[in-house]
Amino acid sequence: MAIELKRIGEHEMPWGTSALGKGLYVLDLLGEVDRPQRFTQLIKLTGFPKGTLHRILEALMEFRLIRFNEADQTYRSGPRLFRIGPQSLG
């Protein structure tokens, strides 16, 4: 039985994992860009509906994988990513 795949950005995710895939896609984008991104910029980059992107960002912030800077209204990688990264190497 073949697994159905759904394309999210440049990635193909198994059907039924699109929420996870979308969250990982946002994390990937924030790691690839040169500077923190505003919500409107992330809408353009992801193509996700506003409500979907908002829920994803809220979940990622809850797990401290990203953080929101109120001063400039931008999102960037969060402290937990920096803790998880080195753990995965050894």
Image: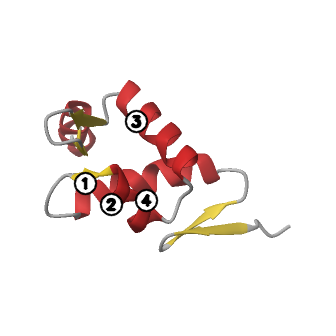
How far is the residue under mark 4 from the one under mark 2?
5 Å
Judging by the rendered image, the residue that carries numbered circle 3 is 60
Q: Is residue 46 left or right of residue 18?
A: left
Task: Tell me what residue is drawn at x 44 percent, y 32 percent.
Answer: 58
Judging by the rendered image, the residue that carries numbered circle 1 is 37
Residue placed furthest toward the bottom: 10
Are the residues flagged by discs 3 and 4 in contact, CB closer than 8 Å? no
Does dot 4 land on a helix, a strand or a loop? helix
The amino acid pointed to by label 4 is Ile
Earlier sequence position, callout 3 versus callout 4: 4
| Residue 52 picture location, percent across and down | 56, 47
Residue placed furthest toward the top: 62
Judging by the rendered image, the residue that carries numbered circle 2 is 41
| Residue 73 picture location, percent across and down | 23, 41
How far is the residue under mark 2 from the one under mark 1?
6 Å
Judging by the rendered image, the residue that carries numbered circle 4 is 43
Q: Against 10, is 42 above or below?
A: above
Q: Quadrant of the C terminus?
A: top left
The amino acid pointed to by label 1 is Gln
| Residue 30 picture location, percent across and down | 28, 55
Q: Nearer the viewer, residue 14 or 66?
A: 66
When asked about the image quadrant of residue 70, the answer is top left
Are the residues flagged by discs 2 and 1 in contact, CB closer than 8 Å? yes
Does dot 3 land on a helix, a strand or a loop? helix
When asked about the image quadrant of residue 40, the answer is bottom left
How far is the residue under mark 3 from the one under mark 1?
14 Å
Q: Residues within 10 Å of mark 4 (few under 14, many from 20)?
A: some
Earlier sequence position, callout 1 versus callout 4: 1
Q: Nearer the viewer, residue 38 or 21?
A: 38
Are the residues flagged by discs 4 and 2 in contact, CB closer than 8 Å? yes
